[in-house]
Every structure is written in C-alpha cells, then in structure tokens.
C-alpha cells in the first residue's frame, strides 16, 4: 500500500466515512518561506449578552427566579404552597420597601393552616415563567412604571409561561453540595414562626431544610446554608411556616457554594468551563441590544450594577424579561480576569433602539464612559477605583477596549439611529474618552469613517447574520478590503437562516468565512460569534453557541468550530495557493476554503480546510520551504448530514475528533471528509 493510500485508509478508518473516489484532486501549496501578515492575538473572542436567559439563572449562578419581586406587577416565578387546605394569600407590596432601588416586596398572609399542613411560597428556578395558577393567565400590561409591554414581549411571556409544562429540570440539587440561601424578611407581631427554608423534590420529599427564626417589624437579612442529602434535577425551593400571620420577603436568593473559582455572587462552574475551553482572547459585554435597551430607560447603566446587590435596581431587558444585574460591571470584569481574556465593555452612547438622549444632555453618558475606565483601571485613591477596591479588587483590571454604542448609526429597521444621530453622540464621546484615556482602544459601530463621523475611527464593528451560502461566498471578502481605513472587528456573526437550532451546515459557512478573517488578520483584528448562550425554554434567538438548562450543557457545532479556530490560531499567515478540482457544472459551489499559518515557538504549520460539499475531497498538499519529514495530526469536525445538531441527549454528536497521521513528506495526499472542518498540524520531526 502506498503512503498516500495508507494515509487515506487511516483517515477513513478514524472518521468512519466512505470516501467517494474522484478523478480530480485539489492542490494546496503552502509557502513556508514567505511568512505573511501577523495573526492578531485578539482574533478569536466571545460575546456575552443577556439574551435567552443567559444571565440570571444561566451564567450568573442565581438559582431563583424573580428574587427581588420586581420582575412584573405579578409575583412571577413564585407560586403559593397551601398544604392541608388553609387560607393563604400572597401579593406584591410597596408599602415599606427594602430600599428605594428595590421598591417591591412579597407579602405572605397565612390566615389559617389546614390540619397537619403548612403554607408558604415555592420557586422552581428558571423552569419557564412560573405563574400562580390562574386560568386564563393575564399578563401585566406594564413591565415597570411607564413602560408598556410590547406585543412581542407578550408573545415571549406566553412562550415562557408555556415552557413550565415541558421543562424537565427545576433546581438542580446535587447530593453533598451546599447551597447558600439569603433573604430579607420583616414580620408582623402576630406571626410566631419559624420560617422553614427547604429544597424539596416535587412531591415534597425534603433534600435539605433549615428553620430560620425571623423576628422584628424592620427588614433583616438572614443567611442559611443548605446541604443536600440527595440529588434531584427537578427540585424546588420552599419557604414555609406552620403558624399563621404575615411575613414580608425580599431579595430571596439561592446560590451553589461551588461557583467558578468559588466566587461569592459567582458564575456557574459548568458553563464557565465551556468558555475556558474556547480560550477567548477577549469578552465583549454586556450587549448587543441588551446594552442599548429598547428605550433609553431600559439601557444598561453600569453605575446601577455595582455594589450591594439589594441596591441594584435591575433593568427591563429588551429580550422580554427583567435582569437583576447581579451580574454587573464588576462581575463582568472579574469574569474576564478569571478567563484571562481582555475585557471589551460596550458602553451605551446615549442611544437606545427607539430613542436617543438629546446631544445637549449627553454629558452624563460620556461621563459614564470615562468613569467606567476609571472604575476598571483607576488608582484606589480615585473615587471609582476606591469603589472597585471596596468590592474586593484593589488591583486594576486593565481595561483596554471600549465600544461606543452597539449597532448605532446603521439605520436598521429595528432602530439604533442613523449615521448623523450616531455621529452627534460618537464624535463628542470619542473626544472625551480619548482625552481622558489616550491608550484606550475604541470601537465604532458605524461602517467606516466618513462624514458626519468626524472623530477618528480606530476599529469598526461589523455584524453578519446571513445564511451559510453568504458566508461561503464572502470568504474572500476581506482580501480586497480598503487597507487605509479603520481596522475591522467582526463583533457579531452567525449563520441564521437554515441553521436550525445550530447545525453543522451553519458551522461550515462560518468556518469558510473565518478562513478569510484569519488570512486578513492585518485588517480583521478581532471577531466574536453571537449570541453565546441559550436556555431553550427561554429562547428568543437562534442559533447560539452553547445550550444549557439548570443541570445540563452542550455546545453546538458552531461552538466546536470556534474552538478549532481559537485553539489553533497561528502567529503568522503563510501564503496558500488552492487549486480546486475540475467540476462539470460551472455553477457548482466552491467546495474548499483554506488558510495556513505557522506558530512562532514550535514552527509547526497549521492548515485549516473547510469542505462544504457532501463528497470527500482528495487533495495533494505541498509545503515549500519546510523540512523533509513532518509529523502530522488531523482534527476533524464532521457528521453524516449538514443538518445534524447536538442535543442534551447526544451532546457530542457533532464534535471534533483527532487522528495521528504519522510521518508525511511533501507533497502528501489527504482526503477531506464530506461536510467537514479540518485542522492539520504539521511539525518537523
Ligand atoms: O446577538 C443578538 C442581537 O443581534 C444583538 O443584541 C444585536 O446587537 C444584534 O442585532
């Protein structure tokens, strides 16, 4: 058997597909003598936006929904427990608030307890939108004072409410693990207590329980540790009593003790591990449209997201639910540090999707941008640096990247303003940020620098959500881009039409496009797929990179594609000549997309090739200027059908598999699997 046939046999055996023999062979020639552009170390980052319930109950490890009772003008997320047939009521109450940022509490009136029974409230976590049994459900018409619910949000609420019937998992309680409960309570003198806090199975069987002796007519904070004696993925949290009286509750919060890096008020460890595996160079946060808000009153204002959790008002989220901002500016910066990723803060530039601040009133918004840098980087003697230190981080976070707005100035049908409106805000914001912090690298959201944008544009953020075919057809787009303009940040991109809930076809299109980004990394210096997470019961956007519920998590094929590019980023691009095989049909799609580069430290050559077709593609790979003998490995992401997806039941159906190809010379033959993304590493023996 010749070396080439042997290689082909090994690859077919390793990846389990049947190669279809073809007369024509692709030619790939890589010139190792002529290193090209440096690959930007920031090329592969991630973008976190609070969408699809990716914040509270997602990455932010809070386990209870609507902990502060501010979510709607109904106690959404909380249902009544009335065992034994007593008389029990609950209602939102603004009479004696915890503080002015947190105006609503829950009043529980236990008028009578049935024989041997108990009464209280139940929270099932983020198992859909839990609503006290009422038929038909009447949703609130306003989400906050003065903010009417839009028809789109009503549709989402209905979808979220329906989700509770099919959600498999409530609270994910694990045997032997400890859960940290905290809550504020005030007690009417007629209530003799105690309150029992418990984690329970749906049938009431107790997994962990503690009695809490609450007292006093003024708000007091209570903290309890609950250690589970059994596991249950569909558990519930209950606060109950066996005595009558009235109790007010607020900020009822439950966290696993085991957050990522054991941080208090921390992040879910299993979801963070998914991000660790991506080795993100940077993290863009907190949006996206989330940061803009549908209206300015719903914009992300970072100063409202730091300090005492009970003093954070939260915000109505453009994606149809309320966000606590317990995952606030400090926690975002800490997440970046924990992942060794550069923080990229997207500051609202005074523009929401539907309205904008008058330019003459822009100063506070500009000051927010300057102060955000001071909070992240300033000395502990400065006003904002001192607050950072008081949050437990005296060392600076070293923020270097700031985006001024999101999708503003593009005249999109959904809003965000036109070029003039953006320029009226970008120009002064850029000037003041750079005057205060000349080293901060800014990113603009308008396509290129041209009037009315008069301030310099250092880097521009481009967003793409087309089908896979568009990405393939535009894989060479940056080869001919104007090099005299700003640098490019592809800040949001994903295959949308035809992507299902995240299939291989979507990943193939994105991978083809990414070969062009990497080849042109002198220009395209940063990129991040969007969005990052989805809880499928709270899905507003498809597709996403990582799918989770309270107990499970998996990556889509696009997740693995991002991993392949991020974990195999060369330091320098090598010239690559791709000769495609002859095809009879002149309209046939281009089958292969490729980019090559070299690592400085090891000298190894990294070749990435995308085969978008359903046929095995034979190739002859020639390396000019490389040593005679090379050891080769292949990592391949493929599956039988381009529509294949991963799922909770089959989380790695489409996941990369590696094979050692042994020694190869130059040229050598390799067959690219149908519907595949392949990374070849070629290293001197
Ligand atoms: O990623 C989803 C949304 O798409 C982002 O919020 C917005 O920036 C874009 O339109």
Image: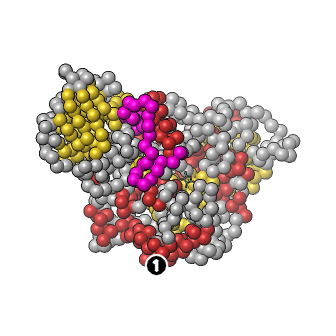
Residue 461 at x, y percent in the picture: 58, 62
Q: Secondary structure at mark 1?
A: helix
Residue 656 location, quadrant: top right
- Residue carrying label 1: 435
Numbered range of the magenta stretch: 124-152
Residue 134 painted magenta: yes
Residue 133 at x, y percent in the picture: 38, 30
Residue at left offset 83%, top offset 38%: 23
Residue at left offset 63%, top offset 72%: 449
191 with respect to 570 (left or right): left
Q: Is residue 349 above or below residue 514?
A: below
- Which is nearer the eye, 410 or 502? 410
Q: Is residue 106 above or below residue 606?
A: above
- Which is nearer the eye, 98 or 615? 98
- Which is nearer the eye, 249 or 334? 249
**Residue furthest bottom as drawn:** 435
Residue 18 painted magenta: no
Crowding near the residue tagged with mark 1, few <14, some 14–19, many ≥20 C-alpha atoms within 10 Å: few
The quadrant the N terminus occupies is: top right
Residue 244 location, quadrant: top left
Residue at left offset 42%, top offset 48%: 143
The answer to whether residue 441 is seen in the rendering is no
Magenta stretch secondary structure, dominant: loop
The answer to whether residue 419 is seen in the rendering is yes
Residue 510 at x, y percent in the picture: 64, 48
Residue 77 at x, y percent in the picture: 37, 38
Residue at left offset 70%, top offset 41%: 672
374 with respect to 112 (left or right): right
24 with respect to 658 (left or right): right
């Amino acid at each position: 058997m010749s070396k080439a046939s042997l290689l082909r046999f090994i690859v077919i055996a390793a990846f389990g597909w049947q190669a279809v023999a073809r007369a024509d062979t692709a030619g790939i020639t890589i010139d190792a003598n002529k290193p090209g552009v440096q690959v930007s170390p920031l090329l592969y980052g991630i973008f976190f936006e609070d969408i699809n319930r990716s914040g509270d109950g997602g990455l932010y490890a809070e386990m209870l929904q609507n902990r502060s009772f501010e979510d709607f003008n109904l106690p959404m997320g909380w249902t009544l427990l009335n065992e034994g047939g007593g008389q029990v009521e609950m209602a939102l109450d603004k009479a004696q608030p915890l503080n002015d940022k947190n105006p609503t509490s829950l009043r529980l009136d236990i008028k009578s307890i049935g024989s041997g029974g108990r009464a209280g409230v139940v929270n099932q976590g983020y198992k859909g939108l839990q609503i006290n049994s009422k038929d038909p459900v009447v949703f609130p018409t306003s989400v906050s004072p003065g903010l009417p619910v839009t028809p789109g949000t009503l549709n989402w609420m209905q979808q979220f409410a329906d989700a509770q019937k099919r959600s498999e998992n409530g609270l994910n309680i694990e045997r032997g693990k400890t859960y940290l409960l905290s809550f504020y309570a005030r007690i009417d003198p007629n209530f003799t207590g105690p309150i029992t806090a418990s984690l329970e199975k749906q049938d009431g069987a107790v997994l962990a329980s503690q009695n809490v002796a609450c007292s006093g007519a003024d708000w007091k904070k209570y903290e309890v540790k609950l250690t589970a004696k059994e596991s249950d993925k569909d558990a519930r949290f209950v606060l109950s009593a066996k005595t009558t009286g009235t109790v007010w509750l607020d900020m009822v919060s439950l966290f696993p003790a085991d957050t990522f890096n054991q941080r208090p008020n921390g992040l879910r460890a299993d979801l963070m591990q998914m991000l660790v595996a991506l080795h993100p160079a940077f993290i863009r946060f907190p949006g996206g449209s989330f940061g803009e808000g549908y209206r300015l009153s719903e914009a992300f204002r970072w100063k409202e997201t730091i300090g005492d959790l009970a003093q954070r008002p939260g915000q109505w989220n453009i994606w149809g639910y309320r966000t606590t901002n317990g995952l606030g500016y400090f926690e975002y910066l800490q997440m970046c540090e924990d992942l060794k990723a550069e923080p990229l803060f997207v500051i609202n530039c005074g523009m929401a999707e539907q309205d904008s601040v008058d330019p003459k009133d822009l100063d506070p918004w500009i000051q927010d941008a300057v102060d955000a840098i001071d909070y992240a980087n300033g000395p502990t003697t400065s006003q904002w640096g001192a607050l950072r230190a008081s949050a437990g981080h005296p060392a600076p976070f070293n923020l270097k990247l700031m985006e001024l707005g999101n999708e503003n100035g593009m005249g999109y049908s959904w809003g965000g303003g036109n070029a003039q409106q953006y320029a009226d805000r970008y120009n002064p914001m850029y000037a003041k940020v750079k005057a205060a912090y000349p080293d901060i690298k800014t990113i603009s959201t308008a396509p290129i620098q041209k009037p009315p944008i008069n301030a310099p544009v250092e880097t521009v953020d481009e967003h793409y959500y087309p089908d896979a075919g568009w990405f393939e057809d535009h894989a060479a787009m940056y080869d001919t881009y104007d090099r005299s303009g700003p640098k490019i940040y592809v800040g949001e991109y994903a295959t949308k039409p035809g992507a299902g809930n995240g299939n291989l076809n979507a990943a193939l299109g994105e991978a083809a496009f990414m070969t062009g980004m990497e080849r042109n990394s002198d220009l395209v210096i940063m990129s991040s797929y969007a969005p990052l997470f989805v809880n499928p019961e709270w899905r507003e956007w498809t597709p996403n990179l990582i799918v989770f519920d309270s107990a499970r998590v998996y990556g889509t094929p696009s997740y693995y594609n991002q991993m392949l590019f991020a974990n195999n980023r060369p330091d320098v691009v090598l010239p690559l000549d791709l000769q495609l095989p002859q095809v009879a049909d002149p309209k046939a799609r281009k089958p292969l997309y490729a980019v090559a580069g070299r690592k400085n430290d090891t000298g190894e050559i990294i070749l990435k090739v995308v085969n978008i077709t359903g046929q095995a593609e034979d190739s002859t790979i020639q390396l000019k200027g490389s040593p005679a003998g090379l050891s080769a490995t292949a990592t391949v992401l493929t599956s039988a059908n381009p529509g294949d997806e991963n799922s909770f039941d089959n989380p790695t159906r489409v996941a990369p598999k590696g094979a050692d190809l042994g020694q190869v010379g130059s040229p050598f033959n390799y067959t690219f699997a149908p519907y595949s993304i392949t990374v070849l590493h070629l290293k001197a023996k």
